[in-house]
Amino acid sequence: MRRLRPVIGLLLIAAFVAMALLASVIAPYDPFKSSVEVIDPPSARHLLGTDELGRDILSRVIYGARTSLIIGLGAAICAMGIGVPVGLVAGYFGGRVDMLVVPLIDLFIALPGLVLALIITVMVGPNLLNLVLVLGFVMWPSVARLVRGQTLALRETLYIEAARAVGGGSAWIIRRHVWPNIMRVVAAQFAVSVSFAIFTSASLSFLGLGIPPPTPDWGGLVRAGFDFLSLNPLMSLAPGATVTATVMGFYLTGSSVR
Amino acid sequence: MNRKWIVCGALSLFAAVVGVSAAQAQSVSPTRGGTLTVGFLSDSKTLDPIYSVQFTERQVLYLVFDTLVKYGPDFSIKPELAESWQLANDGKRVVFMLRQGVKFHDGTPFDAAAVKWNIDQRLDPAVASPQRGQLEPVIDSVDVVDVHTVAFNLKTKYAGLVSVLGERPGFMVSPTAWKKAGQDFGGQPVGTGAFVFKEWVRGNHITLERNPGYWQKDLPYLDKVVFSDLAGSVVGAQRLLTGEIDYVGELGPQDIRQLEGKPGIALAPISVGRWYSLQWHMDEAPFNNAKLRQAIAHAIDRARINEIVMRGKGTISDGPTPAGLWWYDEGIKSPEYSPEKARSLLKEAGYPNGFEYVLSTPQVAALQQINQLAQEQLAEAGIKVKLEPVSSAEWYDRLVKGVTNFSPNRWTQRPDPDGLLYILFHSKGYANTTHYRNEKVDALLDQARETYDIDERKKLYSQAQKQIVADLPMLPLFFSVEYAALRDNVKNFVWIPDQIPRFREVWKAGK
């Protein structure tokens, strides 16, 4: 079973990425085109039915993968971009720098990610770029904490001490000896961050703070279907299932690499 | 100088046409007795009419209290606690002849002194009634002429005064009970109404019982009305199907799909819905260009928007007033859908390649749907619209402050034409967020405000509305539809255009 975890994870990720990249090929309809067939139940023509503006739900779910992919990857890259350097510097140099960084990280980690993202999104206003930045900003402390911990442990190892003894500069040591040793952990954390970002952005959309209409995104689709559960439960369940599968894919992959 | 008697209940033709609901069977004689259980989407905080603000409170207030006048299904004004009224002092004094022999539930008599006390309370700054802002600019004082005659002295001629007395300011509270209860009156209301307040278990239910001494002969038919709190209208629909409740309101055109054709259920669409429109700043580019506004009007397919957002069950709007209200004029028409005309007008306006603009998009489902459809339709005319999300609270604030230029909007109809037309389209109207200013319209609205004759007033409002629709400060889209669903043994339920359900004359057939 442990061996299967990364396989299942990677398969789910592959399916998700394919859905995002090939959306225009596999979606049966234009996801933005309205029609007068409003909230129709699933049928041969519309496998998942139509939404409140008569748009094909299946097509919107497929296109929603693009939004989720952009948010997930974008936010994870942002989080890495801040978290990795901060963690490396704090862990490697320690001392005053560390004493400044650690309380800051702890402060962020003490606040639940969703709540923090919610507050910032309300302030800056929801759109794709803002969501990527907000989620990246919310996630960087956990990346930084992980990288710092790993770096701190490496700093005391003999080969780093040896490198320092032969006169290696800090930048060179970090690049040459520290980074290659923590890359695996960072990669795992990256996958976990993607899953967190997708899940949190779906939650924000569900709360009405997601991508502005008419762009389809999974959280927003779940929300839209919520009012019509008795007419067509798939309207919410289908995008909900894709969120779950994708988040699971990244999580399984990430956690088994670690 | 007495002018003539005001004839109320004019245009009864409209009354016959509109507001006829599914659950009507006037020819059968009403059955006495029974309990009506109303699914209550409560936001109620107080049942004291003097302090009432919330929407649902009025469902209860209209049963426990009577108003001085009442509304017909076309918002025409009919006598209630006031049997008739006449003008004096060149329209600056309105004298009400009160119904005799009416008693409050506590046994005290309803008379001219009680009316004066009720209005004085609302005008008293120390009482801080939310209605003061509405009444204070109009009413100077109230005189007791004799036991059953009371006179309102106005600061200026104001034709909307009588109509105001059919809503919150017109609910007549027992002065004795109010003084006795003090702060607690909101939880133990005493009026002259068809039902007597029994109990209110907050968050659960409100119970009212039949007033055996009600002044209107034979009324009410029901023994009891129970307002049972609901978590939402969809939950209500389920409870209605099982027969636990007899009534649930605030159902949208999609919500009723699970109720349509179900045995034992009758649907009652509201007679007059909210007015949905698109609006812009008349004094700011690009919408200060009349040709461009017309181009947009031709580019928008109102019928399709109604078809999708309202399942085709709303009414396409040609102006701010829906058919069924006495100030509606069927001669008023908005530009018809025509993408070709839109494109040529856009050229004439100086935008041969279209333009780009942001459309404010609040978190309100219907408005978001409208915006997405408008975006789709305007794109075909070459106008690129970007939807800008904003929270509902912030949306209205920005509109009022003039930060937002292009936005959808919606308004509930008021009992008097002065209500909506003046506030939206007079240059001094407090809700004039389009910065619309037309001296002709201002003059017509001012004149109509001081004209008591209903036919003359109607002509003035027709002229004003024609001009408004031609100037296009707001682009009319549709009037919404909303439903109440009732068990089909509930009879004689009739909608009033203010969307507050009235249960006073309802009866239940069989057991």
Image (tube, rainbow, N blue to C red):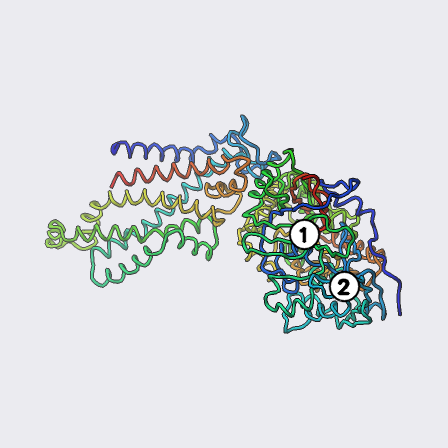
Q: Nearer the viewer, residue A125 or B194?
A: B194
Q: Is residue B339 in sight in this rendering? A: no
Q: The disc labelled 1 sits on which kind of residue?
A: Ile
**What is the crowding at mark 2: few (fewer than 14 residues within 10 Å), some, or many (at least 20)?**
some
Q: Is mark 1 on a helix, strand or loop?
A: loop
Q: Give above or below for B63 relative to A41.
A: below
Q: Do the residues labelled 1 and 2 touch (CB within 8 Å)?
A: no
Q: Left or right? Give the position of A244 relative to B463.
A: left
Q: Give above or below for B487 relative to A7.
A: below
Residue B500 tag number: 1
- The residue pinned by badge 2 equals B161
The outermost residue toward the top is: A44
Q: Do labels 1 and 2 share a chain?
A: yes
Tell me where residue B215 appears, x and y as whole percent. Answer: 77, 57
Q: Which of B289 and A108 is in front in this view?
A: A108
Label 2 chain ID: B
Tell me where residue B308 appears, x and y as whole percent. Answer: 62, 39
Tell me where residue B116 appears, x and y as whole percent. Answer: 74, 70
